[in-house]
Image (cartoon, helix red, strand yellow):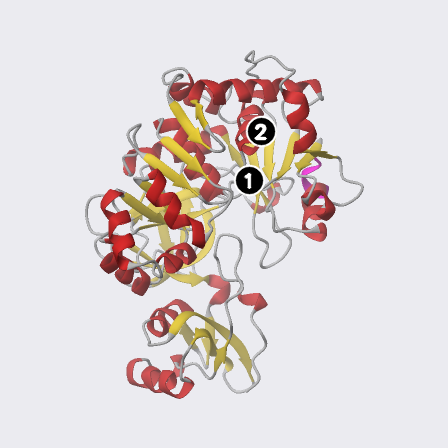
Amino acid sequence: MTLPDLFELSFAGRRPEVALEWDRDYTFGEIDDRASRMANLLADRGLRLGDRLCVYLPNCLEFVDLFLAATRLGVIFVPVNVLYRDREIRHILADADPVALITTEELLAHVPADAPAWTIEELRGAVDAFPATRQIAVTDGETPAAIVYTSGTTGASKGAVLTHNNFIANAINVVTCWQITAADRLLLTLPLFHVHGLGNGLHAWLLSGCRLRLTERFAHEQAATWMREFSPTVFFGVPTMYVRMLDWPPAEAAAIGQRMRLFVSGSAPLPAQVLEDFRALYGHTILERYGMSETLMNISNPLYGERRPGSVGLPFPGVAVQNRRPDGSLAADGEVGELFLRGPNLFAGYWRKPELFTPGDWFQTGDIAVRSADGYYTLQGRRSDLIISGGFNIYPREIEEFLAEQPGVTEVAVAGVPDPRRGEVPVAYVAGEFDAAQLAEACRQNLASFKIPRGFVSVEKLPRTALGKVQKHLLPRWEP
């Protein structure tokens, strides 16, 4: 089975039903026909099985058309973060070697002048001339469907090759474990260039046959109106979205909560305090889960059962998880280790870098975690974020969670900085109205001495990726 086969459950089974709200309502039949016309246009322009197609677009209807067309032609879809600029785009173009990069006339200014660029405006003017006849070139689920480039926070980004089978396994797990059905209404404000929006949002919609409201982005000022007008039952978000939603009036939050069935959070750690505050305001416990570009979804809190604050939950069906010590042995329950994964959701390797990962092997995530006796996993941060101070291991997430509970703190990140005596010491970067002396005293009362931040740096906001993940390498330099 391939993605076009899977999506037939909606395109053939629910053809006359409303599928997507954008500038108007579109049925599954209309979305199907649009994808066929786009596939025929791309084939006319020379794209064939195995070719790469870069798409540098904000959320729009044509993004959906292009992805579906690529899955039918066997063209490898390469989404590009719309926040990327010349240097980052040039790296992806050189690595992926696409036939073309599709963008808007506005974003074209950020694309290298020598790139093989087509604008979506020119495609809009041409696509209606092509017939809506089907052509399906993919017959093998192991065929690459997409190359998703990692954020590259520790070096040049790498292209994770995701197959049709990877996406299928993920979609089935998401729809099954979270019980998404045709009766649901999904509000999708996440960027489709990321696997959270693409692999979870778009695929859950197409597999379940639910009704989708797609927006270009999450706009804090408009999102409450969207929720009131569309009445979604499912919402996929990132922690920064949920933090902003805490500012909405309590009466409006309660009304939204009454209509909603499921709030899901991912792409960055959800502070336990945000979960508790959100539950008090909306009457819902956010379901936190854990995934990666290379693996899609791995672990999730349960739909029914305890959604544990600070924890990402239990492994998805078919996903094997090991928590290992540095020597490779298995960490005991309650002991800090590094997560290793294996399963049908794991990618087929890095594009043009086969030496970095062999399909079928255990994948070393770089994420530090603790497993509880009853199987719940709690992330402690990235292995690269580990602070070793005077021989003691310090996991920033523990300090961040504590500081996030303190009055006046809106967001916080803890990072290690060089120290001539201890090697490294923790420093806290804090946004909000806070008193550094009071924070230091609170830490002295509640944390081991070596975990107390040596400084509290006031920042207007933390540097984050488009999906809300903190970019610690961009934090300002601390001067003691």
**Residue name at image x 47 percent, y 83 percent:** 455
Between 7 and 361, which is closer to the camera in this rendering? Answer: 7
What is the x, y in percent for residue 267? 44, 51
Of helix, strand and loop, which one carries label 1? loop
Residue 121 position, x and y percent, is: 67, 32
Q: Residues within 10 Å of mark 2 (few under 14, many from 20)?
A: many
Classify 20 as above or below 362: above
45 sits to left or right of 354: right
Label 2 element class = helix
Q: Position of residue 45 (x, y in %)?
A: 71, 22
Q: Quadrant of the C terminus?
A: bottom right
Look at the image and give the residue range highlighted in magenta: 94-98
204 on left or right of 307:
right
Residue at the image point whose x is 41% and y is 50% from the top:
340
Kindly tell me whether residue 48 is visible in this rendering.
no
Q: Name the residue beneath numbered marker 1.
A: 349
User: At label 1, which amino acid type do we have?
Assistant: Gly
Outermost residue toward the right? 114
- Residue 245 visible to the viewer: yes
Where is 49 relative to 147, above or below?
above
